[in-house]
Amino acid sequence: MEKQETHSGWSYYSFKDLNFRETALHEGEGLSSIAGAFSQGPGKPHLNYLVVPPGSTIGMHLHRYDGEEFEEWWVIIDGEGEMMFHNGDTVALGPGDTVVIYRGMAHRAIVKGDRPLRCVVILPQTPARGIVYAPGLPEEFRTRSNIQITDVNYVGVPLKAVCHCGAEWTRSEDDPHVYSLPVWAREHRGH
């Protein structure tokens, strides 16, 4: 769909008017539907509409491109789910909720219940050379483990992480959906 510019300075987008494509996002289970609403170009905001049906998941991933990491914001429109982070934290998702995922935080989402999880997903800044970040994150959002290596074939899927205590986690072949990373991180939380 083309942007519907009714007045200078704004555009309109809707779930009902976008061209969705089905894909297994970040090696998740099942197929989700995603549609790009707009992207203002390198270094600028990007917005997707996302529908994750019951029984499907978004695989564990973070947003790292060319060695730089980016935030992602989820606004839940309908449905219920759960987001799990690589540090072992989880948060319930429901209509009206917003989750801000800071740089360096891997995450996955699952649907709870029998309705699709419908959300708007925003990258406030997309990859570009010379990005200047605001100074520091609030202390409570600093990760205690860092993703060191991601799979180049699947954008941002973690392959190796290191805890601040020095312990290492490596994705095994029998863990394609990266379920073991949050468990490992939770075990190292107190170190």
Image (cartoon, rainbow, N blue to C red):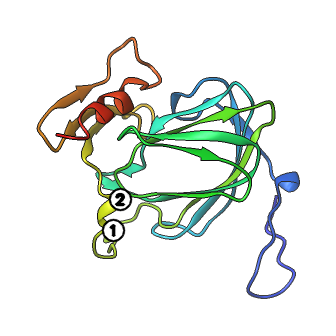
Q: In which quarter of the image is residue 82?
A: top right
- Secondary structure of residue under mark 1: loop
Asked whether the beta carbons under mark 1 and mark 2 sit within 8 Å of each other, the answer is yes
Left or right, 147 with respect to 107, comes to left
Compared with residue 94, is residue 41 higher up or lower down, i.e. above or below? below
Residue 163 in percent (x, y) is at: 20, 39
Residue 176 in percent (x, y) is at: 44, 19
Residue 167 in percent (x, y) is at: 15, 32
Left or right, 179 with respect to 133, comes to right
Gap in angstroms between the C-alphas marked 1 and 2: 6 Å
- Which mark is on residue 141? 2
Q: In the picture, which quadrant includes the N terminus?
A: bottom right
Left or right, 187 with respect to 78, comes to left
Q: Residue at x 79, y 68 (%)?
A: 3
Q: Name the residue under label 1.
A: 138
Left or right, 167 with respect to 114, comes to left
Residue 151 in sight here: no
Q: Which amino acid does label 2 sit on?
A: Phe
Q: Residue at x 42, y 45 (%)?
A: 62
75 and 124: which is toward the camera: 75
